[in-house]
Structures are given as structure tokens and as C-alpha cells.
Image (cartoon, grey):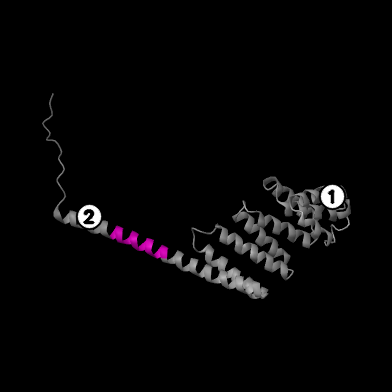
Amino acid sequence: MTSNENPITENPPTEEEQTLGNKVFRIICMTFCLGVTVLFIWVWHHQTQFNDHYRKATFLMHKGEANQAIEAYQKAIQNKTRTIFFTKDSSVSSAYNNLGHLYASVKEYAPAIESFQKAIEIAPDITKGYINLTTAYLAQNLAAEAREACLRALQTFPKTARLHYNLACAYALEDKSQKAIDSLTQAVNLNPELKTFAQQDSALKGIVPELP
């Protein structure tokens, strides 16, 4: 049995529909281009602000103006986070490390530790943050925290002399003399100059004569 229904055919779009479609397409393209342009300007502006504040902060730090340098680094980091795409590059880690040094220099160890932890979070493959963090712990006689942080870091960076040195300091503060000697020996083997440094360190100068 055959059907007498006529096949359904689609009429081609009218000229008016084509014109409307072209307008919509142009609007979408223009909106996209405008959005990309605005985003580029936003990122460029805050990256420029980051660079300016970072340079100012570094200049102030070298001049010994810690409080002003802290404020400038905070502004630099704030602008960097607004760039959206480049919040975890090495320059941000460096800013946090410098900020931590400045806090430590004015005995504000809690924000110093927080800054060093941020630096590690951003750049976990750079030893500087770990060294700074463990040094900040030792400055507060937080031997257990310094020891644990050193041991964790040394799993990734076993040849970092300063981490072995800080571990020796932590052990010495905990009255674990033999472990302190072993760690200091490893530090000096990696960097002989640390022996002279240890001779002037109150935590280690008593065990320096016992080094092999």
C-alpha cells in the first residue's frame, strides 16, 4: 500500500532570515573579541602593577626599610593574583620568600612561616622555600617542626647542604647529639664552608669538635 502523502521539503531561508543570522554571528564575534581584549588589558594592567610593586619592594628591602617593603610585596602579590593565569610562577614564589624574610627580620614569625609555606606551595621544586621555612622554625626554637620539615624536604632534595645543617640544629635543640653530629657531617661534606658557620652557631658550636 503506497502513501499518497507528499514528501516534506524544507524551504531555503529567506533573505531576511539570512540577514538576521549574519547579524547574530557578527554580534557573537564582536562580543568574543571584546571579551578577549578586556581580559588582555586586565591581565596586562595587573602584571605591570606586580612588576612595579615588586621592584619597589626589592629596592626598599635592600635599603633596610622592612615595613614599607612588606607593604609593597603585599601589593605586588595582590596584583599578581588578579592576573588569573600567572599566579603560580617563580616570581610569585620569590615574592613570598622575600616577604617571609622581611617578616622574620622584624620578628613576626607567624606571617613569615605562612609566607614560606605559600612559596613552597607555588614552587615545590625549589629548595629556597624549605630552607627558609625550617630556618624560621629554628628562630623560634620550634625544633620538632623544623626537624619534620627538614626530613620531608630532604626526601626530595637529599643533596641540599643547608637542609642537613638545619636538621642538625633541630636535633641539637632536642639534645639528640649523635643525630646532630651525623646531620652536620652530611652538611659539611656537601658544603665545607658550613663548618665555619657552625662554629659560630650557638646550637652547633659544641659539637663541631666531634665532627670526623
Residue 106 on the magenta segment: no
Amino acid residing under circle 2: Gly
The part of the image, by quadrant, that contains residue 70 is: bottom right
Mark 1–mark 2 distance (CA, rounded to whole Å) = 79 Å
Residue placed farthest to the front in the image?
Answer: 192
Q: Which residue is mark 1?
A: 181
Q: Which residue is mark 2?
A: 21
> Does residue 193 sit above or below 5 in this rendering?
below
In the displayed structure image, the side of residue 78 where residue 31 appears, left or right: left
Q: Which numbered disc, 1 or 2, marks the residue that appears first in the sequence?
A: 2
Amino acid residing under circle 1: Ile
Label 2 SS: helix
The quarter of the image holding the N terminus is: top left
How many C-alpha atoms fall within 10 Å of the one at disc 1: few (<14), some, or many (≥20)? many
Q: Position of residue 25 (x, y in %)?
A: 26, 56
Residue 29 on the magenta segment: yes
Q: Position of residue 44 (x, y in %)?
A: 45, 66
Residue drawn 64% across the image and 65% down it = 98
In the displayed structure image, the side of residue 8 where residue 188 appears, left or right: right
Q: Nearer the viewer, residue 44 or 42?
A: 44
Q: Position of residue 125 (x, y in %)?
A: 62, 51
Q: Position of residue 202 (x, y in %)?
A: 85, 61
**Magenta-drawn segment:** 27-40
Whether tag 1 and tag 2 are in contact, CB under 8 A, the answer is no
> Does residue 63 sit above or below 9 in this rendering?
below
